[in-house]
Image (spheres, rainbow, N blue to C red):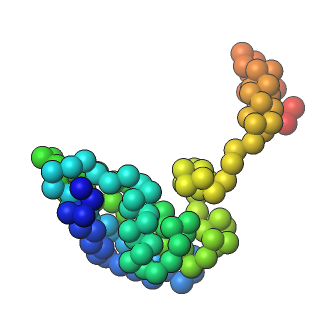
Amino acid sequence: MSENTLIRTRKFMSNRLLCRKQMVVDILHPGRCILSRNEIREKLAKTYKTSPDVVFPYGFRTQFGGGKSTGFALVYDSLDHAKKFEMKYRLARNKLVQKGRKVRKERKNKAKKVRGTKTKKSKKDS
């Protein structure tokens, strides 16, 4: 079914300071729901001749009535630049950064000590 989908990019901009290409992505998908993020990444990677690891699609909204979705995409020059400049939650979505279990538990236990006390006291402890 994905063969009848069409991906177009517009408002293309090459951002040399952040070592990436930025664009608005229009997806025409009549008769089916929107493509998954991984499918979008693979198709954009093929279009821009790069690996799917450095492609970050986000913010997709489907038009009323379906059939067309619009969002944004960032294509970095390398994986190192992506890890340096991309937001942590987007890296986690693309499984490039793993959130450590120990860090989560330490933050939880620190929050348990602070809960119910004045914030000034907790800021002095930190």
Q: Which residue is at a point 44% across and 64% down the rendered structure image? A: 41
Residue 123 seen in this snapshot: no
Q: Is residue 27 left or right of residue 103?
A: left
Looking at this rendering, what residue extends furthest in the top direction? 116
| Residue 117 percent coordinates (x, y) | 75, 18
Q: Residue at the location (30% across, 73% down)?
A: 9
Q: As rendered, which of 121 and 102 lies closer to the eye? A: 102
Decide: is 6 above or below 108.
Answer: below
Residue 11 found in image quarter: bottom left
Question: Quick check: 68 above or below 110?
Answer: below
Which residue is found at the position 42% from the left and 75% from the top? 46
Q: Position of residue 61 (x, y in %)?
A: 29, 51
User: Residue 113 location in percent, x, y?
Assistant: 80, 21
Q: Is residue 63 above or below residue 104?
A: below
- In the picture provided, is 6 more to the left or to the right than 82? left
> Where the N terminus falls, by quadrant?
bottom left
Residue 29, given in percent of the width and then of the height, sits at 21, 57
Quarter of the figure with residue 43: bottom left
Asked whether, in this view, residue 58 is left or right of residue 18, the answer is left
